[in-house]
Image (spheres, rainbow, N blue to C red):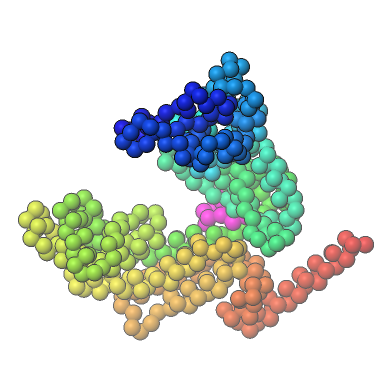
Amino acid sequence: MTEEERIQPAPAAFKADVWTYFVFRTKEGGKDYDKSYAVCKICTARVKYSGNTTNLRTRVSRHHSNVASNANFKTKRGDPAQRTIEEVNFSKLPASSTRATKITQSVLVFICKDMRPLSVVENKGFRNMIKTLEPRYTVPSRQHITDIALPKLYQEVKATVLDSLSSAETVALTCDAWISRATESYVTVTAHHITDQWNLQSHVLQTRAMHDSHTGEHIAALLTDTVAEWGLNTKDLVVVTDNTPNMALAARLAGMTHIQCFAHSLNLASQKALKIQSVVRLLGRIRRVTVFFRRRTTASNQLKQKQCLLQLPAHRLITDIITRWNSSYDMIERFLEQQPAICAALLSAEVRKSEKEIFTLSESDITCVEEVVRALKPMKDATLVMSEESMPTLSIIAPLHAKLVMGAQESVDDTPTVRDIKTAIAEDLGKRYVNERETLWMASIVDPRFKDLPFLSEAETSETYSRLLDTVVTVIKKEKNVSK
């Protein structure tokens, strides 16, 4: 007998109204009722039954108050005026009710936070899930979400963001131009500030399609509109962008102080190093091997077996993305990690039997690859530092920049390839932040980690401290004038 077949309604002799919401199960392998407990029709919970209905009424009142408030426990079961469990449990929630409003709000947050398409409210799986969680709730239409619910939520969130920005003493902006998978161009503007509790707060203010070309003039107009819409003070406003000339022009036209994104600067310098002919050749060979294992099932299976045999991590080989230098670094590093397993797999009879031409790297190539990784590791570490920081990173730029340039100095033990890599990095980084260095030094001096400015000369350190003192005096005078 199935579980459903064992569920039986209470005997007709049980006249109490509460039995509208409870049933019995039959005993295992028999037809007699198991009256030691009753089963709630609403939530299927088992409730102890000892001959009276006190426990059952308590269960309904405590856990199903909506049913209890709508039900008249004084009427007898079978009274035409008494609503059935289906009528009570599945009567639709009014859209304006507190419960329905909260669920709709959760649906909107789900769409926005997880970046789901608005059509998700029409999906059968989504509707079935909602029906299971709350059968009385009616999922709003896509049109209602688009025309009413989302605009209302936007205005509510915007009011919160405006309040947050208005309480900030200073605000900095980041501006990013990017292209979607559908090759549509967008520009995103984000505001950052420190709260009274010294927490970093970030708000995306705009993500706007750029139907016009990404000229400095067009981006400057977008920045100006954004600043006006969100009521930001344009005085001393700083914007961080990538290193493209159009972004620098946009910041200047908008009257903002421009800071180049250091992570982008690291990417550009590293890309220069990866374009050295000897490195290009090595990358091409490693890429060919990784693609081979990704496209050949036999080779991939052999690699997994050799990883297990050699007790190496069961990591997949990485194929790089040309526009992201760190993916090339990760590809090389993973190749070196798995080199013993790769060689063993390529030499296996199974792979050799199915492949006529097998491409490998020579011992001298492997040695050169190891040197490339060592030469690029400082750039990789710096990139991780910048991307993993949860606090403002402006104060880190100057010391990191100085350390990388110093580390890129040639050594007598450097091979020609390493020497070329260091030269490419030093030349590219050396021309960055020449005009912004005073701003960067001021940011570093107020950071306890770098307040001694060990990366500067004695004269530069003294000059920076003098500038800091002048700034402090100016701020104090301004505050005194305001208090008067």
The answer, for residue 180, to whether it is visible in the render is yes
Q: Which residues are magenta?
A: 239-250
Q: Is residue 135 left or right of residue 232?
A: left
Seen in the image, is 164 located left or right of residue 312? right
435 is within the stretch colored magenta: no
Q: Quadrant of residue 9?
A: top left
Residue 22 image point, x, y percent: 50, 31
Please state the horizontal and vertical placement of residue 478, each as a whole percent of the image.
84, 64
Q: Quadrant of residue 112?
A: top right
> Residue drawn 67% across and 37% down?
155
Residue pictured at 64% horizontal, 55% vertical? 201
Residue at image position (21%, 69%) is 310
**Image quadrant where one finds the C terminus:** bottom right
Does the magenta segment cover residue 241?
A: yes
Give above or below for 21 relative to 170: above
Q: Is residue 261 above or below residue 469?
A: above
User: Please, is residue 250 above or below residue 449 in the view?
Assistant: above
Total count of labels: 0
**Residue 102 visible:** no
Between residue 50 and residue 335, name the one nearer to us: 50
From the top left corner, tell me how far across and down residue 473 is, in percent: 81, 72
Q: Nearer the viewer, residue 308 or 342?
A: 308
User: Compared with residue 467, is residue 68 higher up or lower down, i.e. above or below?
Assistant: above
